[in-house]
Amino acid sequence: MSGHVADSRRQVLTRGIDLNALGGREFTVGSVRCRGVELCEPCARLQSVTQDGVLKGLVHRGGLRADVLNDGDVSVGDAVTSAA
């Protein structure tokens, strides 16, 4: 078990964001516009690189797959905002 953030295979990590609410909706991260496609449920690979039991705590909380709709920049600390 390495426990490195990159082991989760997530490209953007967030805190305090209801990613489930962004499914099917457009939102921005930094200057990048995205569209939420589907929830990213945790898989056995994630558990294999982290710790036993991690999957149970991540059911319906594993992230969101999204399409990137434009070129742009994302930086640490950029806000995730829902498009109106």
Image: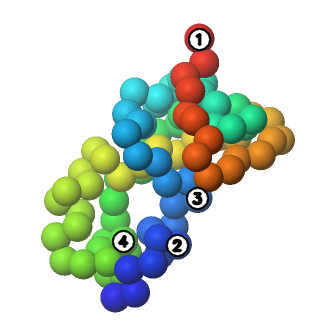
Q: Earlier in the sequence, mark 3 or mark 4?
A: 3
Which residue is at 28% across, 45% downward?
A: 60
Q: The residue under label 2 is which amino acid type?
A: Ala
- For label 2, the SS is helix
- Residue 46's disc number: 4
- Residue at the disc numbered 3: 11
Please tell me which residue lies in front, 14 or 63: 14
Q: Is residue 35 visible?
A: no
Could you tell me residue 59's position as x and y percent? 24, 51
Quarter location, residue 72: top right
Alpha carbons under labels 2 and 4: distance apart: 11 Å
Could you tell me residue 63's position as x and y percent? 42, 48
Assess disc 1: are there few (<14), some (14-19) or many (≥20) residues with their C-alpha within 10 Å of its C-alpha: few
Instruction: Specify whether 71 is left or right of 15.
Output: right
Could you tell me residue 13's position as x and y percent? 49, 54
- Residue 84's disc number: 1
Alpha carbons under labels 3 and 4: distance apart: 14 Å
Q: The residue under label 4 is which amino acid type?
A: Leu
- Residue at the disc numbered 2: 6
> In front: mark 2 or mark 4?
2
Which residue is at 51% across, 26% downward?
A: 24
